[in-house]
Image (cartoon, rainbow, N blue to C red):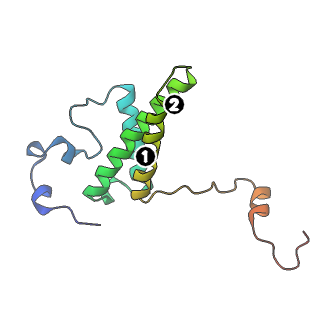
Amino acid sequence: MLPESPVIAHRPPTIRSAITNDPLMLRGVDGRSVIARRYRDVAIALADDLGGQKTLNESTKILLRQAAALTVQVEYLQTKIVAGDDIDLEQLTRLTNVLGRTLHRLGLKNHPPKPTSPLAEHFSRPPVRGDVA
């Protein structure tokens, strides 16, 4: 992780850009719309998956904002499909692929869910010598 630039860190918040003060926000968006709130929720969740907003370097924050924006756009198109509206499936495919590559660049990978019941946990373990199959 790169340390925060001393030049930026010691400048008062009133003369820094809004994005520097709140790295998960977007310029010109007031944040109260449904889409803006969903974007922020996704960005915060991704930041948490990466160890928290304070631990992220600038390039990771940029990719994180991109992933959150792509997620909101993909979800919007999925909503239109479920509502029975026609959409450009090629656009959805492209956005989904770009989102997958962005998440991969962030180091986020799909992990299978952990077993939640003792029985599922038992059957997910490799057999131990002497166990009856």
Between 39 and 6, the residue placed more toward the observer is 39
Is 132 above or below relative to 53?
below
| Amino acid at the residue labelled 1 | Leu
Instruction: Report if residue 106 is visible in the image.
Output: no
| Residue designated by label 1 | 99
**Residue farthest toward the front in the current orientation of the protein:** 90
Q: Residues within 10 Å of mark 1 (few under 14, many from 20)?
A: many
Which circle's residue, 2 or 1, is located before the other in the chain?
2
Q: Badge 2 is on which residue?
A: 78
| Residue count near mark 2 (Cα–Cα under 10 Å), binned few <14, some 14–19, many ≥20 | some
Residue 127: give x, y in percent of width and height: 81, 72
Of the pair 100 and 118, the residue shown nearer to us: 100
Decide which of 3, 58 is in the foreground and name it: 58
Q: Position of residue 30 (x, y in %)?
A: 26, 29
Is 35 above or below relative to 112?
A: above
- Please provide percent x and percent y for residue 19: 21, 44
